[in-house]
Image (tube, coloured by chain):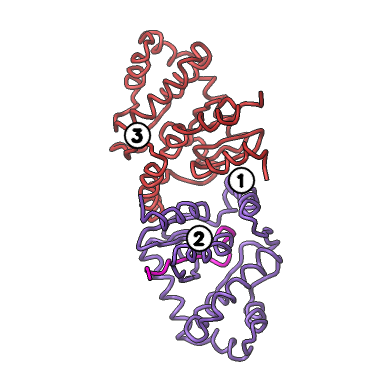
Chain colours: A purple, B red
Amino acid sequence: MAAPIDFYFDFSSPFGYLASERIDEIGKRHGRAVTWRPFLLGATFKIVGTAPLLDYPMKGEYSKHDMMRSARLLGVLFRLPSVFPTSSLSACRIFYWLADTRPDLAKPFASAIYRRYFADDKPIEPAEQAIEIAASLGLDRAAVSAALQDPAVKARLKSEVDQGIARGVFGSPFVFIDGEPFWGSDRLDQIERWLETGGW
Amino acid sequence: MAAPIDFYFDFSSPFGYLASERIDEIGKRHGRAVTWRPFLLGATFKIVGTAPLLDYPMKGEYSKHDMMRSARLLGVLFRLPSVFPTSSLSACRIFYWLADTRPDLAKPFASAIYRRYFADDKPIEPAEQAIEIAASLGLDRAAVSAALQDPAVKARLKSEVDQGIARGVFGSPFVFIDGEPFWGSDRLDQIERWLETGGW
């Protein structure tokens, strides 16, 4: 089987959410697993010199319109959260803890976080909110709470973020297919085509 | 016939060039004329708080790769010019002068400018370069030269730029279909679909 697709995203990213609702089925159609890699986009802002999307005059207004229109086109339920953007540190840490201890629950947890935030307009921080979502998947609250404070889990997230930056990830979603980088949910068609053809 | 599509672009914009090679045929398939409106993207940088694309670490490198890959996918000949970005003031002025006096030559002139810069890697500034291209379309050099200094032509360009900004144009290409805004050559598929369906 071909190498997995790497799927980087920030839990606070609308376009990351849209891609998360489609990327696994795209991979599946082409015999590819998809490795989900939540990271902290804020860590790249200083390096790249960018800011949160909605902070930009004109571009921010357009982007709101564009994300809603793109969601409708993809058939994905989407609302711009009333509190936006959000920190996603707890969600990221829980995700990587699950990826290492209960890998079967890592993606369901990530999807539950994304849908809670972008479809239900409910908060994913502070930590209690993310813990609640983990509990809804049957996980033990105390164990999740402990994981959030575990230096090894913190280090795992930091390493993922550093590795993403080293690979050139500066936006969300950001996908690699055999090393080929694709930025943006508007590259899903190109991603599908790249998988079909092996590149052009 | 339905209202024309408005197509805003900057002559120094790779993605504007890519869109310019496809937008008229897209319009034609759906019975729409396309009004080309070159403008000066630099005028929006201060308002939006953005900078030329390649000035951004990480994002700039990715964008170079992305524009070449997107050009190959669209089947458009493209090279990143050795001197990039460029001013395009002369090209813009000549374009609007033609739009008002020789409208049949305005788009051919714009395409010739774009291809010279992005396919042939030749300069489009200073003014002599843009005049040369106008001359290659059979225009009188002295008349073109005079137009470049004409206060009415200068005012026409300024008015187009101001109007674009007032309508929310902050990037290139930027397209309006019956008031609906689309930013980026990666929205050509959405543009086509919008024209087909009247929106979604």
- Of residues A154 and A191, the one nearer the viewer is A191
Q: What residue type is labelled 3?
A: Phe
Q: Residue at 48%, 54% (x, y): give it.
A: A50
The residue under label 2 is A172
Q: In this view, does B180 lie to the left or right of B130?
A: right
Q: Residue at 54%, 44% (x, y): give it.
A: B48
- Of residues B82 and A180, the one nearer the viewer is A180
The residue under label 3 is B118
Q: Which of marks 1 and 3 is in front?
A: 3
Question: Do marks 3 and 2 share a subunit?
Answer: no
Residue B177 rendering spot, x and y as whole percentages:
62, 34
The residue under label 1 is A62
The residues colored magenta run A1-15
The chain letter for the residue carrying disc 2 is: A
Cα–Cα span, label 1 and label 2? 17 Å
Residue B199 in the image: above or below residue A148: above
The N terminus of chain A lies in which quarter of the figure? bottom left
Q: What residue type is labelled 2?
A: Ser
Residue B81 in the image: above or below residue A112: above
Residue B61 rendering spot, x and y as whole percentages:
36, 52
Quadrant assignment, res A75: bottom right
Q: In this view, does A134 lie to the left or right of B122?
A: right
